[in-house]
């Protein structure tokens, strides 16, 4: 017949094809998902004698698909990754895949580097033709039922308008834009609008203080801030715009603020600097071309806490991040076109980026944005809302599960949960008791529990069960996803085999890996690749059982995890010592029934200062104001002296033991300058709360 002008791709390789041809492929059914046609629709494939069209091939059993992926990856990684790259749309399809190396000599993290694409096109435009009328974002406000729906078509128009408004304010490719927002659709719209014009967004969680916000604005050099008049959480207003005003007193470079109307509160507007979104919106066109971005062009910066110094600006780039968000959402949660997916994270955290927005939207799914809290108006909120919206996949934190478990089963049981089919958790280790409750009570024993281990740095999940493929075990994130190579090392860096416990590293790059610490590439290398040369060090410890299941035990560095929020002990310490009456502070984590970990601070006062409950209250308030409510210490112990070695190092190991009420296990204190300090601290620990 006649050679058509549409090439066929099989396994990433291009073939000429005849018009209206039938291909006979020697393939196992599960591999069908990896074949694609540029025009998708006209040709039919025969897989083992049965005809499939492209639509059907995409719908093959997800477990078969993941098994086929693992096999293909083992066979030829380069070919596999280029096949996977076909999940997303490129204006220039890459020929390169992984060009990364973790070694000092040729250190680089780079994926699909010669490809070109736009993230916003992938999350919005490409769904318009096939399902423009499908709900993209299902917004649920703080009050039950206060909501709205945006179809993909609505989202497209709003994003284009916002993108034009940003351009009007002078924002262009590569410029940084700060978002300080409630969980409203406009947060998603603004993020997608940045991506559309190649601007780099940095979302700052609305719970951070004006000072924390100012630090982040200045670190990334943003000129534009997007915010709302107020947020609304649990019936209480949050003064977002007022906080921005406070922050901007220290941010001379910011010349424009876009204010979205959320509560309608009367807020100060500064002439020429502040713009109402509702007014700007009317002045801009609903059409905005998307910028073609190189795969390695920056997509966003998200600040996260490390063990030292101020928060790091974790930078993710366009191609690899999007691919990883798309792939992991698909194999962990996706697969059914009518799914309603609800991830309860705030867009101020990485989970909100990857699994409220970019994963679901790039897969054309319906995603819920929730602007409330689990306990408002009552402890049944999650299940009432899930039932009302028909949520099928629900993803939340162990902290929320533990808090709701304590409130009792009746809050769950009074609501219909029959729409739920899959339940996920993320953010911190989940204790088997909470896991079992989630499975038995919330999921009525029918829904699998997907415990996903990952980090801001990893872009998306790395260790997690694939529904149907991996048998779950309460408390284990189970096994690595395809393309993820975890290892456990001892303190000296020796590789541990088999059933063991050690420090968790990842031996090879994956597409969603962070690319740098914004503005400080050396810090990036130092932080993650020098503890164990040639490997990415996660900062987590883990146990591996005889069947190869991973059980994350928590951070092994000076980062603590409070309600799933990362907090550097150094940050809380520097906030405390900034108080005029404080001489020195040491902060450690302590076990906490609900939050996983609480914050325990040892504080030494300046000479002559009196320690009392009044000052304890004042210091807690001080830290809230300096960093934000999530950093409020749970316990403050006034200590005349801290346990120090002769070289002046605080022995945190000892402080952790005392804070955990494990004074018996303190062990050797002979290297301390003054071993008696320890006894005094143990005796004083009762009064810390
Ligand atoms: C996605 C996210 C990362 C840290 C990470 C680890 C802890 C996350 C976990 C988990 C045990 C899980 N963590 N998921 N621990 N089981 N399923 O939370 O990113 O805020 O950067 O925190 O959270 O300690 O190192 P991030």
Image (spheres, helix red, strand yellow):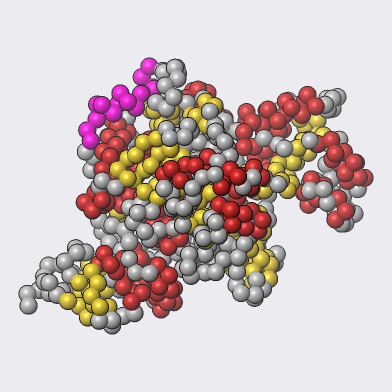
Query: What percent of the width, then of the height, locates residue 488?
Result: 63, 68
Q: Is residue 270 above or below residue 225?
A: above
Q: Residue furthest left?
A: 2
Q: Residue at x 72, y 33 (%)?
A: 577
In terms of depth relative to the viewer, which is nearer, 604 or 369?
Answer: 369
In terms of depth relative to the viewer, which is nearer, 440 or 101?
Answer: 440
- Any part of residue 613 in sight: yes
In terms of depth relative to the viewer, which is nearer, 607 or 655?
Answer: 655
Q: Is residue 392 magenta?
A: no
Q: Say whether residue 338 is left or right of residue 142.
A: left
Q: Residue at x 53, y 49 (%)?
A: 396
Query: What percent of the width, then of the height, locates residue 81?
Result: 37, 67
Q: Residue at x 81, y 36 (%)?
A: 688
How many labels were placed on the picture?
0
Q: Is residue 263 above or below residue 637?
A: above
Question: Dividing the image into 4 quarters, which one contains the C terminus?
Answer: top right
Q: Residue at x 28, y 57 (%)?
A: 89
Q: Is residue 277 magenta?
A: yes
Q: Say whether residue 213 is left or right of residue 23.
A: right
Query: What percent of the width, then of the height, locates residue 221?
Result: 45, 36
Q: Say whether residue 337 is left or right of residue 553.
A: left
Name the quadrant containing residue 211. Answer: top right
Question: Dividing the image into 4 quarters, which one contains the N terminus?
Answer: bottom left
- Any part of residue 429 in sight: no
Extent of the magenta region: 271-286
């Amino acid at each position: 017949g006649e050679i058509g002008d549409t090439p066929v791709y099989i396994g990433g390789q291009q073939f000429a094809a005849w018009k209206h041809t039938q291909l006979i492929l020697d393939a196992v059914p599960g591999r069908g998902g990896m074949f694609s046609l540029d025009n998708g629709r006209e040709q039919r494939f025969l897989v083992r004698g049965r005809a499939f069209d492209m639509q059907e091939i995409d719908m093959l059993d997800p477990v078969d698909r993941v098994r086929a992926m693992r096999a293909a990856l083992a066979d030829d990684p380069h070919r596999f990754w280029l096949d996977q790259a076909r999940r997303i749309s490129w204006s220039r399809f890459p020929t390169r895949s992984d060009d990364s190396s973790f070694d000092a000599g040729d250190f680089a993290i780079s994926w699909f580097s010669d490809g070109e694409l736009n993230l916003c096109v992938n999350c919005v435009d490409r769904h318009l033709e096939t399902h423009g009328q499908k709900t993209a974002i299902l917004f649920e406000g703080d009050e039950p039922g206060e909501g709205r729906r945006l179809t993909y078509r609505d989202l497209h128009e709003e994003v284009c308008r916002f993108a034009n408004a940003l351009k009007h304010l002078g924002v262009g490719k590569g410029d940084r834009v700060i978002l300080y927002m409630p969980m409203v659709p406009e947060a998603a719209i603004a993020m997608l609008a940045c991506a559309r014009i190649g601007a780099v967004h940095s979302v700052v969680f609305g719970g951070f203080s004006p000072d924390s916000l100012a630090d982040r604005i200045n670190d990334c050099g943003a000129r534009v801030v997007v915010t709302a008049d107020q947020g609304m959480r649990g019936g209480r207003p949050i003064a977002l715009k007022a906080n921005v005003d406070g922050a901007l007193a220290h941010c001379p470079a910011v010349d424009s603020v876009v204010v979205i109307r959320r509560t309608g509160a009367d807020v100060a507007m500064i002439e020429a600097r502040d713009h109402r979104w509702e007014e700007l919106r009317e002045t801009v066109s609903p059409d905005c071309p998307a910028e073609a971005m190189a795969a390695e062009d920056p997509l966003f910066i998200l600040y996260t806490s490390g063990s030292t110094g101020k928060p790091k600006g974790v930078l993710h780039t366009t191609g690899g991040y999007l691919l990883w968000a798309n792939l992991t959402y698909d194999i962990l949660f996706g697969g059914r076109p009518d799914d309603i997916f609800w991830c309860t994270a705030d867009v101020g955290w990485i989970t909100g980026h990857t699994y409220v927005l970019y994963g679901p939207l790039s897969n054309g799914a319906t995603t819920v944005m929730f602007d409330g809290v689990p306990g408002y108006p009552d402890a049944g909120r999650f299940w009432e809302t899930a039932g009302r919206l028909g949520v099928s996949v629900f993803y939340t934190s162990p902290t929320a599960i533990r808090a709701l478990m304590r409130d009792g089963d009746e809050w769950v049981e009074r609501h219909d949960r029959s729409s739920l089919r899959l339940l996920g958790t993320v953010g911190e280790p989940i204790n088997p008791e909470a896991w079992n409750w989630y499975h038995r009570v919330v999921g009525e024993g029918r829904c699998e529990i997907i415990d996903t281990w990952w980090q801001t740095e990893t872009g998306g999940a790395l260790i997690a069960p694939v529904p149907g493929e991996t048998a779950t075990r309460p408390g284990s994130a189970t096994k690595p996803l395809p393309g993820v190579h975890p290892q456990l090392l001892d303190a000296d860096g020796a590789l541990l085999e088999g059933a063991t416990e050690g420090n968790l590293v990842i031996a090879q790059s994956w597409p969603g890996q962070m690319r740098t610490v914004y503005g400080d590439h050396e810090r990036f290398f130092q932080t993650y690749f020098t503890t164990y040369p040639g490997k990415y060090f996660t900062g987590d410890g883990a146990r591996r059982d005889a069947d190869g299941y991973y059980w994350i035990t928590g951070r092994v560095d000076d980062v603590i995890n409070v309600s799933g929020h990362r907090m550097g002990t150094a940050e809380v310490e520097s906030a405390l010592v900034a108080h005029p009456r404080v001489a020195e502070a040491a902060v450690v984590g302590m076990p906490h029934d609900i939050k996983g970990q609480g914050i325990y601070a040892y504080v030494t006062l300046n000479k002559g200062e009196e320690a009392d409950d009044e000052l304890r209250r004042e210091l807690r308030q001080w830290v809230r104001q300096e960093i934000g409510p999530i950093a409020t210490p749970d316990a403050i112990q006034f200590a005349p002296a801290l346990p120090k070695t002769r070289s002046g190092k605080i022995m945190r190991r000892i402080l952790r033991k005392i804070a955990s009420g494990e004074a018996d296990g303190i062990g050797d204190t002979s290297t301390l300058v003054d071993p008696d300090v320890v006894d005094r601290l143990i005796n004083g620990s009762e009064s810390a709360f």
